[in-house]
Image: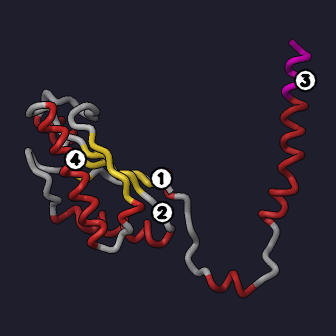
Amino acid sequence: MKTNYLKSVILTLAMVAMMLPAVAKATEPSKNKKSEAKSPVTKIDLRSVKIKNVQFGFDRSAISAETYARLDKVVKLMADNNAAVKLSGHADNKGGYVYNWKLSQARANTVKEYMVSKGADSSRIASTEFGDTKPIASNKTKLGRQQNRRVEIEFVQ
């Protein structure tokens, strides 16, 4: 048991020692001040950014007016950070399987089309439809069904 523990400690220390030169170089101050001045926008890792789901009315794929500002911010973040997003379309369980699948696809496409109309690069927007297969709330209540009629937006950079 002690031998396995020592081996894992030695292996970990060896890996850290191998990474030190790369870490030192990455954290070393830049000697080229001109390149620093050219990039005023700092790119951030957006994968941990949580975006509120885009909600839809019953049997609808139209975006509500209050959603436009949120989508505009997503488009700006994409442009400022050269980022990509994944859209996931969903439906509640009212209606048939195929119908809900197509409705969830239409919802994702509507969001994508809006984002592209605002300047987002369409090649940086992937979309998938799930129909009613991935509810986030109970479909037994009106509120639950409303929460399930959505498009989720996730940065994938």
In the image, what residue occupies the spot 44% across and 54% down? 155
Measured in 3D between alpha carbons, the distance from the residue under mark 4 to the one under mark 1, in whole angstroms, is: 19 Å
Measured in 3D between alpha carbons, the distance from the residue under mark 1 to the one under mark 3, in whole angstroms, is: 38 Å
Residue 70: x %, y % from top left: 30, 64
- Which residue was labeled with disc 1? 156
Secondary structure beneath dot 3 equals: helix
Q: Which mark is residue 84?
A: none
Q: Are marks 4 and 2 in contact (CB under 8 Å)?
A: no
Q: Main secondary structure of the magenta part?
A: helix
The disc, 4 or 3, on the residue closer to the chain's N-terminal end is 3
Q: Are marks 2 and 1 in contact (CB under 8 Å)?
A: yes
- Which residue was labeled with disc 3? 6
> Image quarter for residue 137?
top left
Determine if the magenta segment contains residue 2.
yes
The disc, 4 or 2, on the residue closer to the chain's N-terminal end is 2
For label 2, the crowd category at 10 Å Cα-Cα, with few meaning under 14, some 14 to 19 and many 20 or more, is many
Amino acid type at image mark 4: Gln
Q: Taking 92 as reference, is 87 left or right?
A: right
The disc, 2 or 1, on the residue closer to the chain's N-terminal end is 2
Amino acid type at image mark 3: Leu
Marks 4, 3: nearer the viewer: 4
